[in-house]
Amino acid sequence: TLRKLEPSDLPYLYQWENDAAMWSDADTHNPLSQQDLRDYIGSTTGDLYRDGQLRLIIEQQTETERMTIGCVDLFDLDVRNRKAAIGLYIAPAYRGQGLGRILMKELLTVGRKNSVPEFTLEVRVSNVPAIKLYESLGFKSEGRRKNFYERPVEDAEVMWLRETEPV
């Protein structure tokens, strides 16, 4: 399930945001303090239009426990053109279980309920499983950004999904 950020999410965000191995695939370039993240959690309203972004926590419920396993984002909201970028992070222990498809569908539904019919993303060209996932959800390639990622240097596939395309 997807839910809004809560103060109890601080340890997860701190771990994920400060994983230097993930920085090359994100806009993060420096470590974030717990106070930085506490301030972020405290300032976000969970309203895409007020905040210009929406980060939702991914929880997985089993018979015995509820686990926080990642997050999804709508960001770079363009109100005039009704589009947003999307992001997905699943903790390494939970990858490869088919959760990406389920979560992306939920995120696209959340976006559409917020009157966002168009989505964009950038993904490493070497991340073939992610590209196949996005294509299966209706995303189309719009081209490549040469040498977009720094470490290691690699192109980014730029993909779009528009309202008229199926999910």
Image (spheres, rainbow, N blue to C red):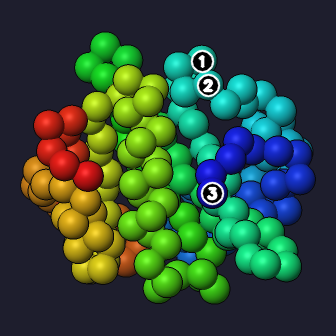
Q: Can the viewer see residue 16?
A: no
Q: Is residue 21 left or right of residue 61?
A: left
Horizontal arrangement in the rendering, residue 54 relative to residue 41 (left or right): left
Amino acid found under the numbered disc labelled 2:
Asp
* Picture coordinates of residue 52, whole percent (x, y): 53, 25
- In space, the residues marked 2 and 1 are separated at their CA atoms by 5 Å
Q: Residue at x 44, y 78 (%)?
A: 98
The residue located at (37%, 17%) in the rendering is 79
Do residues under tags 2 and 1 come within 8 Å of each other at their CB atoms? yes
> Label 1, on which residue?
50
Give the mark nearer the N terminus: 3 vs 2.
3
3 and 2 marks in contact (CB < 8 Å): no
Residue at the spot 63% in from the left edge and 64% down from the top edge: 70
Q: Quadrant of residue 136?
A: bottom left
Earlier along the polypeptide chain: callout 1 or callout 3?
3
Q: On the rendered structure, is 127 left or right of 104?
A: left
Q: Which residue is mark 2?
A: 47
Separation (CA) of disc 1 from disc 3? 23 Å
The image shows residue 123 at horizontal and vertical percentages of 31, 63
Query: Which circle, 1 or 3, is nearer the viewer?
Result: 3
Q: Which type of secondary structure does the marked residue at label 1 adopt?
A: helix
